[in-house]
Image (tube, rainbow, N blue to C red):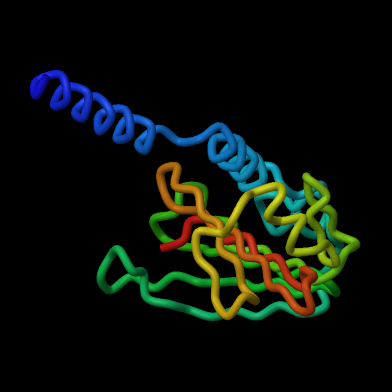
Amino acid sequence: MKHILTITTLLVIYAFCVSAQEPSDSLIIYNERLQNYIHAGFMFKLGKTREELYQNLGRPDSIAVETTNNCHVENVVDTIFTYNYSGITVQTYKGKYVNGGTLLTKVIVTDSLYKNIYDLNVGSSENEIFSVFGPPKKYKNNSIYLYEVIIGAPDGLLFYIEKGEIIKIIRNYYND
């Protein structure tokens, strides 16, 4: 009898551990949606070069240029270009070791004019975010929700919330 009880206990513990390690169907769905959003979330074109950006969004209201030390290679300075439009800001990174010369690093959306898949736009509710992506991995003061996908380098998605609605969406490419 003692052996049967021990075996039964071990089987229950094993079943619990196995089920705890496997993600639930909803977590898999949330992750797939997040990956889709990270890779094809915007329903508008940006482009990969400054010329394509200008072609798709027009000339920016302003451009800011700053230099920064490369965080991977000592004594190398890279350049960050920030293109400011009404309702959207696009940031690119030009570095010596960037394949092709320029990398899209950040997009900040503050206007509902710029649509996203899953209908998560500026003005959408925080409950809509949760129904699409589930609970955030990190949050700050219940006003900033972070979702992150790591495929090669980590990519992030931030939703800024005010009075229960999205007021800003930041899509970080290659968080480093």
**Image: 146 above or below 26:** below
* Residue 102 is at least partly visible in this image: no
* Residue 107 is at least partly visible in this image: yes
> For this view, does 60 lie left or right of residue 38?
right
Q: Position of residue 104 (x, y in %)?
A: 59, 57
Q: Position of residue 165 (x, y in %)?
A: 80, 70
Q: Position of residue 57 (x, y in %)?
A: 84, 59
User: As rendered, which of 68 and 159 lies closer to the eye?
Assistant: 159
> For this view, does 7 lie left or right of residue 145?
left
Q: Position of residue 37 (x, y in %)?
A: 67, 45
Residue plotted at (13% across, 26% down): 6
**Residue sitting farthest toward the front:** 1
Residue plotted at (86% across, 62% down): 58
Tell how many labels: 0
User: As rendered, which of 50 and 149 lies closer to the eye?
Assistant: 149
Rendered-image quadrant of the N terminus: top left
User: As rendered, which of 138 and 104 lies closer to the eye?
Assistant: 138
**Residue sitting farthest toward the left:** 2
User: As rendered, which of 175 and 5 lies closer to the eye?
Assistant: 5
Q: Quadrant of residue 11?
A: top left
Rendered-image quadrant of the C terminus: bottom left
Residue plotted at (79% across, 51% down): 116
Residue plotted at (68% across, 54% down): 130
Q: Quadrant of residue 161?
A: bottom right
